[in-house]
Image (tube, rainbow, N blue to C red):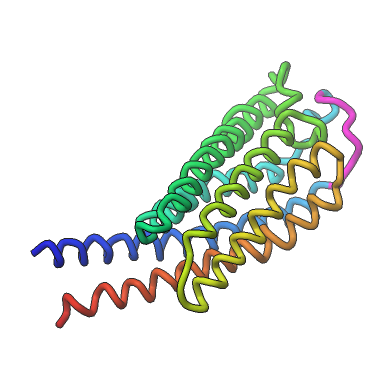
Amino acid sequence: MRTTSLSRTSLYNARVGFWSAIALAVLLTALNIAFAIMAFQVPTSEWQGMEVYARTYRVVAFVPQAIGLLTIPAWVLMLSSIHQYTGERRKVWSLAGLLFGITAAGLLGALYFVQVAVLLPALRHGNWQGLEQFAFANPHSVAWGLDHFAWALLGVALLLMAWAFEGDRLKRWIRWLFVLNGLGNIALIFAFALELEVLTLGVAFLSWVIGLPVAAVLVALMFRSSHSVSKSPTQG
């Protein structure tokens, strides 16, 4: 009876892990597409203050943050499923990664919510006083600092959770993708502090556009395989 209960729990966790990883890959891809569209439609210009920005802002610039909000539940569910999937011997790494991931998700969620639900309505109603430090158009804003810091925390989460994976080739690929994505996103702290825009763009392309979506797809495949293994005993 206990074995059947454990099999059902593992099966349910595998399903949650699979669909959350698929959702994350899709949402990250959508976020990257939205960011590319924004880059083409919103010309880059030197920051001239909030008054000028309030006259020239485009709503499309807030679409990536709106999609970013949707990625947060997928991130947390995927990391939580990985923690549940991890064997007892390595659970300390998955737990540490999950805690850092939840912290990063909370910070990113608050930041993106302020963008979509506070800054955008304020700009539309012309009541933007005091919000200059929350505008992403301002390259030296608190918003950019918090964004880089939150993604660096997520990098720590990925770096720690990487050591929860052991076993076959698929898990080794996931482990090293987590390591590389983790190190890349941790580097964002130095990119912001030292104003290394090239480093930020490099991380954005290699990690956010390629590495993280691919890692999410591989995690989904891992849970798909786990789903099949967990399901077969109960069918017999």
Name of the residue lying farthest toward the bottom: 236
Q: In which quarter of the image is the C terminus?
A: bottom left
Quadrant housing residue 4: bottom left
At x 82%, y 31%, the residue is 140
* Numbered range of the magenta stretch: 43-50
Please tell me how many numbered marks the rendered image carries.
0
In the depicted view, which residue is nearer to us: 39 or 58? 39
- Comparing 158 with 12, the one in front is 158
In the picture shown, does residue 166 fall above or below 133? below
Residue 44 rendering spot, x and y as whole percentages = 87, 45
Q: Left or right of 209: which side holds 171? A: left
**Residue farthest along the front direction in this orientation:** 89
Q: Which residue is drawn at 60% across and 37% down?
A: 112
Please state the horizontal and vertical placement of residue 190, each as a whole percent of the image: 79, 42
In the orientation shown, which residue stands out farthest toward the left?
Answer: 1
Q: Give the main secondary structure of the magenta stretch.
A: loop
Residue at horizontal 27%, vertical 66%?
11
Q: Residue at x 54, y 72 (%)?
A: 172
* Depicted 75 relative to depicted 213: above or below: above
| Left or right: where 200 falls relative to 211 | right
Q: From the top left corner, tell me how far across and down residue 57 is, in percent.
A: 77, 36
Q: Verify whether residue 3 appears in magenta.
A: no
Q: Position of residue 68 (x, y in %)?
A: 58, 47
Q: What is the quadrant of residue 130 in the picture?
A: top right
Give the answer, above or below, for where 222 lies relative to 123: below
Of the 4 image quadrants, the one containing the N terminus is: bottom left
* Horizontal relation, residue 14 to residue 107: left or right: left
Question: 158 or 134: nearer the eye?
Answer: 158
Q: In this view, does 140 lie to the left or right of 13?
A: right
Kindly indicate the quadrant of the structure image that contains residue 213. Answer: bottom right
